[in-house]
Amino acid sequence: MPRKASTEKKKPASGAKTRTETKPEAPVKAADEFVPNIVAFACNWCSYAGADTAGVNRVQYSPNFRVIRTMCSGRVAPGFVLKALKLGADGVLVSGCHFGDCHYIFGNYKAVELFEKTKALVRTLGLDERRIRLEWVSAAEGERWGKVINEFVAQITALGPSPLNHKPKDRK
């Protein structure tokens, strides 16, 4: 005869922390401290999976970014990057498969071509081209994903807020 599942909640051993007690605290920042807003366009097959691997392996990296999953890094048109910057991103990362690993054969070559056009447009607009970055991260490179994110966040933090995001001064 099968045993009935117990509906009684188990109490943690004395001194043990419950799940709610181990919740990390939010970082404390000064009111005027700059916290960059970064958008990452990640290839579905490699970079997005690499970000997932980083999460599964509990790799520590900065939380100052939003990931947008794309089917291929070669589909990230300059307009997408410029729109992200226009809508408040301080930096934009485009990440895809390593050369030779693209599920669409030449998608990452197309990504390089589009990224060069994007850099030219960013320069034309008078923005620092270090606000955008192209990286290759495979599904197995969770550590690399964390390193790339942390480096890019540090780079954008050093550059400061995007000139497109300035707040108008109050007229008195």
Image (cartoon, rainbow, N blue to C red):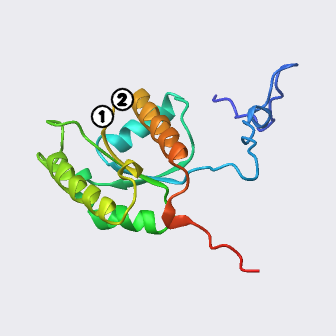
Residue at point 62%, 73% (across, down): 168
Q: Residues within 10 Å of mark 1 (few under 14, many from 20)?
A: many
Q: Which residue is mark 2?
A: 141
Residue type marked 2: Glu
Residue at point 17%, 37% (across, down): 99
- Image check: 172 left or right of 139? right
How far apart, in angstroms, are the residues tagged by discs 1 and 2? 5 Å
Quadrant position of the N terminus in the picture: top right
Occupied quadrant, residue 45: top left
Q: Which residue is mark 1?
A: 138
Q: Residues within 10 Å of mark 2 (few under 14, many from 20)?
A: some
In the picture as drawn, the residue positioned furthest to the front comes out as: 172
Residue at point 45%, 31% (across, down): 147
Residue at point 57%, 43% (across, down): 63
Q: Is residue 110 positioned above or below 17 on the image?
A: below
Element on which disc 1 rests = loop
